[in-house]
Amino acid sequence: MKAVALALGLILLASYATSAARTEATVPFRPGETLTYDVSWATFLAAGTVVMTVTGKKPSLDSMAYDIVADARPAPLLARLYSLYYKLDTLLDVYSLLPQRGSLYTEEGNRHRLKTTRFDRTARKAFFEDQSTTTVRADFPIAPSTLDALSSLYVLRTVPLKAGLHVTMPVSHDGSNYKLAIDVAPAERIKTLLGEIAAWKVIPVVTDDKGQPVGKNLAMWISNDARRYPIKIHAELEVGSFDLVLREAR
């Protein structure tokens, strides 16, 4: 029995040592980072504001995770016409840079909705829940490196970008799997309220699980300095063309 106890102790000690030896992935962001964007939509030059914040770093699922939140609100004029609010969040593991859980909360008029995705990396499954007037649940297989929508942006910031680089990322959103393919074009200078900023032009192409494209003319610009801020994001959707331009970074 003593030999068994000793063996178990050695196994636990080795396991602890392996866990303790883990090092956090190097990232260009930090807890407290807050990025504020002005949103233009169609003919509205000031349609709203998006604020993306790394609210902190906290214990989660026997690990540590960055708690990242993105809030989107309409400008006062549009808010008087129709009440809108969107909140996207993710828990991004500090070691693997894979999301543990992500959610999207929306308020559109009197309708409130919460969509949550939980990732089980061991089972290679995502567990999706859609809560509104009713609750719908589903689970489906995922690739080992699957991200969610918000975490994909922050993980992209960790990639050493250069012209000609091609990157693909599996992404789960709204209970479905997508493929995000990214091509990097030469750096450009983008005008913002912070001044002109040199940024890599990143061209994303999103396809669904049937290979059909989602959205069109997507583009983003990521600063080519050590901070790798997303400077500008452009998207053409069914409801019109959107541009997010960085107004403040702290």
Image (tube, rainbow, N blue to C red):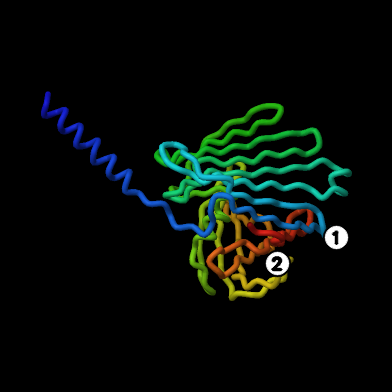
- Can you give x and y, in whole percent of width and height, for residue 250 in the image? 63, 57
Nearer-the-camera pick, 129 or 47: 47
Residue furthest to the top in view is: 1
| Residue receiving disc 1 | 43
Side of 23 relative to 217 (left or right): left
Q: Residues within 10 Å of mark 1 (few under 14, many from 20)?
A: few
Side of 38 relative to 231 (left or right): right
- Can you give x and y, in whole percent of width and height, for residue 217 in the image? 69, 64
Residue type for callout 1: Thr
Q: What residue do we see at 72% from left, 60% from top? A: 247
| Residue receiving disc 2 | 194
Q: Earlier in the sequence, mark 1 or mark 2?
A: 1
Nearer-the-camera pick, 247 or 242: 247
Nearer-the-camera pick, 189 or 58: 58
Q: What residue do we see at 88% from left, 49% from top? A: 77
Dot 2 falls on a residue whose secondary structure is loop
- Can you give x and y, in whole percent of width and height, for residue 207 in the image? 59, 55
Side of 104 relative to 42 (left or right): left
Work out whether 164 lies above or below 216: below
Q: Residues within 10 Å of mark 2 (few under 14, many from 20)?
A: few
Work out whether 171 lies above or below 58: below
Is the residue under label 2 in contact with that under label 1 (CB below 8 Å)?
Answer: no
Mark 1–mark 2 distance (CA, rounded to whole Å): 23 Å
Indicate the quadrant containing the N terminus: top left, top right, bottom left or bottom right.
top left
Can residue 159 be seen by looking at this rendering?
yes
Q: What residue do we see at 71% from left, 62% from top? A: 245
Dot 1 falls on a residue whose secondary structure is loop
